[in-house]
Image (spheres, rainbow, N blue to C red):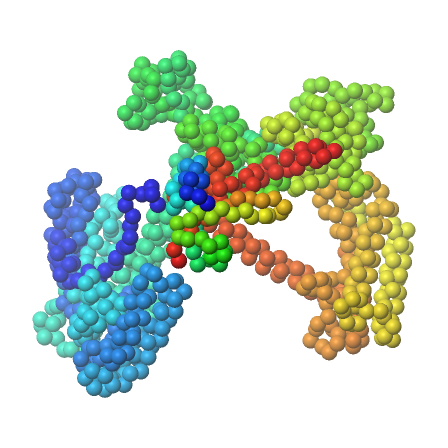
Amino acid sequence: MSMQAEVIKQIKFGIFSQEQIKKLSVAKLTVPDTYNEDGYPIDGGLLDQRLGVIDPGLVCKTCGGRAKTCPGHFGHIELVRPVMHSEFAKIVNMLLQATCQKCHRILLNDEQLGAFKAEMNKELSEETPAAEQAQGKQAEQDMLKKLKSVKKCPHCGTVQEKLKFSMPTYFYVGERRLKPDEIKDMLAKISDEDLDILGIDSKTSRPEALVLNTLLVPPVDVRPSITLETGERSEDDLTHKLVDIMRINQRLEQNINAGAPQIIIDDLWELLQYHVTTYFNNETSGIPPARHRSGRALKTIAQRLKGKEGRFRYNLSGKRVNYSARTVISVDPAIDVDEVGVPRAIAEKLTVPFYVTEWNLEEAKKLLASNQYPMVINVVALDGKRKRILDTNKEELLKEIKPGYILERQLKDGDLALFNRQPSLHRISIMAHRVRVLPGKTFRITYPATIPYNADFDGDEMNLHIPQTLEAQAEAKYLMEVQEQIFSPKDGNVIIANGEDGIIGLFALTQDDTYLDKQETEYLLGTAGIREMPKESKGHMYSGKDIFSLLLPKGLNFEVQSGNDKLKIKNGSLVEGVITKRAYGLGGGNKLFIAIARDYGFEELRRFIARSSKMAYAYATMYGVTMGVKEYIINDDMRKEKEMLLADTQKKVDELVNQYKTKKLEPLLGLTLRQSLEQMIIVELDQARSKAGYALSRNVDKTNFAMLMANSGARANILNFEQMSMFLGQQATWEGRRIKRGYYTGRVIPHMQRNDVGASARGFISSSYVDGLNPIEILMHAVGARGAVIQKGLLTQRSGYLQRRLANALQDYYVLFDSSVRDVGNNVIQTLYGGDGIDPTRVNFAKEEQREKEK
Amino acid sequence: MSRNSVNELLASLGITLNNLPKILVSDPQAQKAGAKVGDVLEMERHDFGKSYTYYRYVVEG
């Protein structure tokens, strides 16, 4: 903490005593009214001019300031009878319970008192660990609870009567109600030493101040009255409440002076208590809220502070920013990945500073003179004064500007802007985009750019900020631009890439048998902005691979092989393999992006993503990618194969069960016979499912769109296809076990044989989604689905919170130029970042290089 | 670590002793190394087949 000059060690809160209130007050208020007939504040009324002025033209009688300079001053009301402060009633109750009703000492003998005191000191000491402090707190609470049941004062021997506290402000001794003045007396007699033992600082807070004799009245600035167009005045809720208090106070005084019967006085006293209680908190439980004439509950002090729209969360924690905009987002596949489409209306409002120098003075003048769209809105002079440009002062300013002036120019294409979507859990939740001014009212981004923001277009809104200084612009450009964020700072995986139709389009285009005619080829290349033709092949046709190759950087050499799939790019042209999600999509397998970024830089990679997605969308449309139930309806051959597979599986399971029953089953290592059976059945049923999937991929046409999706990795996989077309397979509960419990003995539902361990009795479903499930299968499916949903919810919630705590704990650490990790106090956290100084976003580059070396 | 090499280390990082990560004298590993308050320990740690150097400033406690 070497950066701060002063450190706040502690803040102390106390309670104003009657004397302090009077000292603070500039006026004793006596008239329960605001303005007289002339519309002038009444002296001694609630808008007394000594409390400050808010009307322009009037002068404050206390400080002589005007509406703008007078900060406002407190006044006070003297209550004829004391009333409880409802917010502190709990503390008063604690004090009354803890002390003798006669001698007002703590109801503990000296020995116990010593122990209690020690406990208290230990807790307050800074060296005590937090856990022990909490323990101490608990011990105190227990002690205070015990004090309630003490029958006889250990000091004076007085028998304690039962004291009852009823919310919000009533106290009873036995049957008799304690009036506030009695309580005040009792509290006043508690000694300072005893208070200190109970944890109340007697120097700053005497408990008798919790029963109010005088009420501090906030300045008018806190409760301004507003004048309606009709000339009528409308007072603030707090003023209304104070009027109520004063009115009852006055009536109470008159009745007392007139010698009214005690019942009437008590009633009025009670009413005064009600008004004071609601003045502090109009949501006090146990009493009806005070209402406005219209029936609306009044907003009193507690309501002003509390909650989301209260003073703390709304005004103090809630900061607002200039040079920013917010609107709904939507897609635009035509713009570049690092661009953001900004509505014209927003671009005209937001400004970018143009720093006038001796070298750009002419340009500045031209800009300033402009009368249409990218024009100057404000001029900041040398003294920092900001002037709005109007037709009237334009000529003058044109002559005035000189180096050092700043022109605030409207946003235009190519300007840098920070784009953000909440919740900002990531550093990539805020990225720098280039502005592209577009018609319409929404921000536009491309599909690949939605992924780091986790955005979609079902009504999401996002924020745009314009960096104002050159430093900020430079930082945004070199650290935050979209292309810099393609690889994740977590593990170096690709996090900005195309998906779904972007993948399926290129998958279809790069198939071995894709040949397009000249017109189609020109159209595709045109959408991607490429102005050269690939070489002809197969007489006046062009191969899809050649067309795709034009997107690749010139001279790129690249090769990956995973299983039977091989992708080979030689000298900038795709010679073997097809584009799938593995090579082109999100995640760690995307070696193509790594190769491009490593050899050609992020700029080239961004260009590749943008252009290839445009071509992909165009080809997906041209190809006619579509989807319907028809994809999932299988032919008779497949159906036969399915039946055979199921029968076969059934036979195998029955065989296993038989072996088990006759004890011929060979148990697996470390498992009981029963467990072995279970294990073997699960394996068998699982195999059935993969066999079904395999059968599908073998027999279904390659051009079936469901197959196309699964093979390209665009969406879904063979398992999903299989579950829709063939059969669902085993439904699992927690940890992949088969469903076995129900509210019955040895079976899931009464429709089964007891102790049947076969396939269908334990949640194996042999129907497909297309065919539909029978009632028992529906139940089994629901059991499995419910388990999956619950588990998923729990997992995401927990890991999300864990991640958040970690991120918050580490957020202020940074890596210095020497690769060491420091905190704000320049303490070294690690001498070398991560122990090895490797930047995770480029860790895969190194791996690739190493692999090449090893070759 | 010797006084000289400690000073070298601090100079290279541009920090004072107090900015270094700390270890209590009562720490079992510190005791094993026979560390005294005010010493700086240099440790080789083997993670994933590579070795990294860590420093700890020994403090009271």
Residue in view at x 33 percent, y 43 percent: A2
Residue in view at x 52 percent, y 41 percent: A833
Give the total of numbered labels: 0
A853 vs A105, left or right, is: right
| Residue A612 visible in image | yes
* A74 and A93: which is toward the camera: A93
In the rendered view of the protein, which quadrant contains the N terminus of chain A? top left
* A814 and B47: which is toward the camera: B47
Horizontal and vertical percent position of residue A425: 51, 46
* A15 and A599: which is toward the camera: A599
Q: Residue A333 occupies which quadrant of the picture?
A: top right
B46 vs A307, left or right, is: right
**As displayed, is residue A807 above or below residue A446?**
below
In the rendered view of the protein, which quadrant contains the C terminus of chain A? top right
Residue in view at x 20 percent, y 40 percent: A68
Q: Residue A745 occupies which quadrant of the picture?
A: bottom right
Horizontal and vertical percent position of residue B42: 49, 46
Horizontal and vertical percent position of residue A14: 23, 60
Q: Residue A500 occupies which quadrant of the picture?
A: top right
| Residue A489 visible in image | no
